[in-house]
Amino acid sequence: MSLLEVEGLRAGYGPVNVLHHINLSVEPGEIVVILGANGAGKTTTMRAISGTIPREGTITFDGDDISSNSPEHIVRLGIAQVPQGRGTFPELSVEDNLRIGAYTRKDGEVGLDIDLWYETFPRLSERRGQRAGSLSGGEQQMLAVARALMSRPKLLLCDEPSLGLAPLITRELFKIIADLNSRWSIAVLLVEQNANLALHIAHRVYLLETGRIVASGDAQSIANDDSLRKAYLGY
Amino acid sequence: MDRFFDAVFLGLSSGAIYALVALGLVVVFRGTGHLNFAAGEMATFSAYIVWVVTTWTLFGDSALPLWLATIGGMVFGFALGAATEVFIVSPLSKKSPLAVFVALIAILLGINAIDSGRWGPPPSEEIDSLFPNDPDDFVRLFGAVWRWEDIGTLIVTLAASALLFLLFAKTKIGLAMRAVASNPDSSKLVGVPTKLVLAGSWGLSGALAALAGVMVAGSQAQVTPTMMFTIFVYASAAATLGGLDSPIGAVVGGLSIGVVENLAAEFAPGWVGQEMKLSVALLCIFVVLFVKPSGLFGTEKVERV
């Protein structure tokens, strides 16, 4: 059974429909990348899955139908989103950002997890008392990922993590995401414009164009398909 | 020096009331970015409710004790504040912040009209003080008169601000409140029930206002429809001075406004006196905000460009 199964998803803003009948799935422990240009509907797809915008269609997560659930409930079920533009809490300290990430948890191991992610992201550990708003873009992105992990998700949604980051930092970030996936078998659904880097860590890829999935397949075959690459990835 | 300490202490006790109302303003501002213009009237209305409750006789012949009625009044204030957020502020703020402003002014006038229509004109609604306030209930410290009632007001304010500080700094609810203030969208994404948190912030503000209302009414021995008008002006000045998002700022702001206005009135009776003392306080605020626009303890926006 797929971890995430999206069928016939339609979503948009007010009268404007952005997504037209999207089908996609994420298997447990898989990294799936959705590639698409500006305005293709990548962020809308993320928001529809995390429940922050109205949507139609069926979304099934881990056996539960979450098509009409609130964002709060969806987090509790195990989907954590790293929103576009990081979505950190600028006035809160780095440590408080991590704490609030564990808001849905009732176990007593929040402190252990904070230490664990400080090990994974040493820069955050150095800046634990600093306000998140004063971090660099790369550090904020690391914080956003660490914060999402604090809810102990089964599925991590990443909305264009490379946006505004230097290529070197992006590479480091993608490496960490791939490590998280292989070490803790957290499934990842990642949307990107930066095809080159994302294809490296992806197991499977969907190509999204103006609200429709136009191609899909395993990462290798998409990367090797010259016509697809030229038409949609532009290199 | 006696005159000095008299004025300082008088300032601290009236400042404590400003601080208490200012704390309520800060709690709401942190959560929703609105200034609760109706806070003063919420205080007055809750004080009337407390008065009504004290006139009931529940246990045999004895009336309900004032402190118990005050707790009831705070629960009422909480409900009033939370209802204002859920039914008025939250739906309207999606449309326009200006609409919220107008609605809060409307609530201010509406509550005042209800108060005056239902209970006015004064004097009729007599209420005791929460603290001993007979003419001989005082101690002398540094030669100045420290009335028990004023000391009580001061202690209640300091205790309320200490509790609020603990709430914000040490509890999960407080963390959620700070998170919603900082980034409402991301708060939803980490599973914080933002609507509940906002209603709770307004409720807390209403409860603080109710407490202040009972103490103001007690100090003048009756509830009157206009008793919170000037106090609200002082309190909003105190919150601005301290920094609108800082509970400590609200307390320091409230107390210092109280002290400054009373010292000015005491030592420059000729050109300041009782009528002009608010202007002196406001002038000080103007100077502070000119130098430090986010207020004494307010958070300066940190943003990397």
Image (spheres, helix red, strand yellow):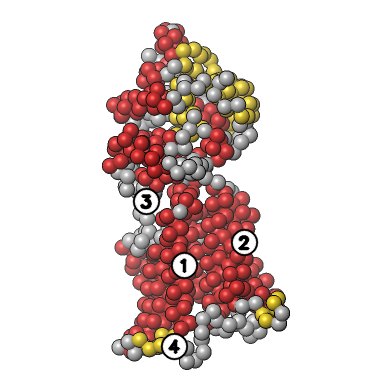
Would you say residue A210 is visible in this rendering?
Answer: no
Residue at 53% x, 57% y is: B201
Reply above or below: B4 against B196.
Answer: below
- Looking at the figure, which quarter contains the C terminus of chain B? top left
Q: Secondary structure at mark 1?
A: helix
Residue B22 in the image, given as x and y percentages of width and height:
47, 67
Eye-nearest disc, 2 or 3? 2
Q: Label 1 belongs to which residue? A: B160
Residue at 49% x, 68% y is: B21
Asked whether the residues under marks 1 and 3 belong to the same chain, the reply is: yes
Q: Secondary structure at mark 3?
A: loop
Report the amino acid beneath label 3. Lys
Is tag 1's residue or tag 3's residue first in the polypeptide sequence? 1
Q: Disc 3 is attached to a residue of which chain?
A: B
Tag 1–tag 3 contact (CB < 8 Å): no
Report the amino acid beneath label 4. Phe
Is tag 3's residue or tag 4's residue first in the polypeptide sequence? 4
Reply above or below: B90 against B112.
Answer: above
Q: CA distance from mark 2 to mark 3?
A: 32 Å
Is tag 4's residue or tag 2's residue first in the polypeptide sequence? 2
Q: Disc 4 is attached to a residue of which chain?
A: B
Is tag 1's residue or tag 4's residue first in the polypeptide sequence? 4
Asked whether, in this view, residue B219 is left or right of residue A98, the answer is: right
Q: CA distance from mark 4 to mark 2?
A: 36 Å
Eye-nearest disc, 4 or 2? 4
Q: Secondary structure at mark 4?
A: strand
Q: Label 4 belongs to which residue? A: B138
